[in-house]
Image (cartoon, rainbow, N blue to C red):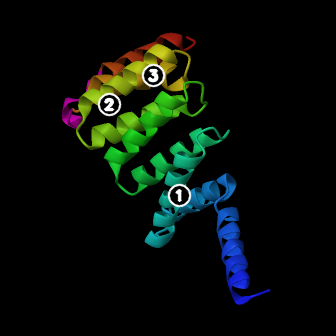
Amino acid sequence: MNRASVLATCALFAVMMMACGRSPEALLKKGNDALLETTKPQPDTATIDDGVKALREFTTRHMGHEHADSAYYLLGMIYGATQRNAEAGETFMTLVQNFPTSRLRPKSLILASQAYENVKKYGYAKQCMQILMAEYPDHEFVKGGSAKWLFLNIGKEPEAWDQSFLSDSSTARASTRPR
């Protein structure tokens, strides 16, 4: 084997090894590791950045994968945990739009609403709550009234929050108590 063949073989092997490390599962694991890193008191930004890059690669290369919705969800969670709220909202809404049957869709609507409210995009935040209430009337967040209360209070300062939810809830609890 001549020197050029050896170098070509080594190069091919190196590319194959890198490709193995870029499997959908490996990319998701990097993303999950990055999300866990955000919970540490002194998070390692390099680990978080690597996870974001891995999840972006996943969402670009593996859209048909069975866990593609999870990749978007992890990415949105990382963006939210690192105060990148505009990107979090957009990422959660990409999940909502591209994966209409995902089990992560209702939670993504809630998190997108929160992210959009954090960047003062109140119209988008309200739209997320409207979709949630319309499409998931049996979701615990909707049934319990939290979605409606949030919808009514998006963009308001705490002093101006609608207190009717609290009084309605206490009235409902009082009327159902045994006498």
Q: Residues within 10 Å of mark 1 (few under 14, many from 20)?
A: many
Q: Earlier in the sequence, mark 1 or mark 3?
A: 1
Q: Is residue 171 left or right of residue 58?
A: left
Task: Give the secondary structure at mark 2.
Answer: helix
- 2 and 68: which is toward the camera: 2
Which residue position holds label 1? Answer: 35
Which residue position holds label 2? Answer: 125
Q: Earlier in the sequence, mark 1 or mark 2?
A: 1
Circles 1 and 2: CB distance less than 8 Å? no
Callout 1 amino acid = Leu
Q: Position of residue 71 (x, y in %)?
A: 56, 46
Task: Give the secondary structure at mark 1.
Answer: helix
Circles 1 and 3: CB distance less than 8 Å? no
The segment highlighted magenta reads 156-163
- 157 and 120: which is toward the camera: 120
Q: Is residue 157 left or right of residue 45?
A: left
Q: Is residue 175 left or right of residue 101?
A: left
Task: Give the secondary structure at mark 3.
Answer: helix
Task: Find residue 132 and name its label.
Answer: 3
Q: Position of residue 50 (x, y in %)?
A: 50, 65
Residue 49 shows in this picture: yes
Using the numbered discs, state the Cα–Cα distance from disc 1 to disc 2 in whole angstroms. Answer: 23 Å
Using the numbered discs, state the Cα–Cα distance from disc 2 to disc 3 in whole angstroms. Answer: 11 Å
Q: Is-magenta flag for residue 130?
A: no
Is residue 149 depicted above or below 29 in this figure?
above
At 50% from the left and 35% from the top, the residue drawn is: 95
Q: Quadrant of the C terminus?
A: top right
Callout 2 amino acid = Ala
Task: Find residue 13 and name its label.
Answer: none
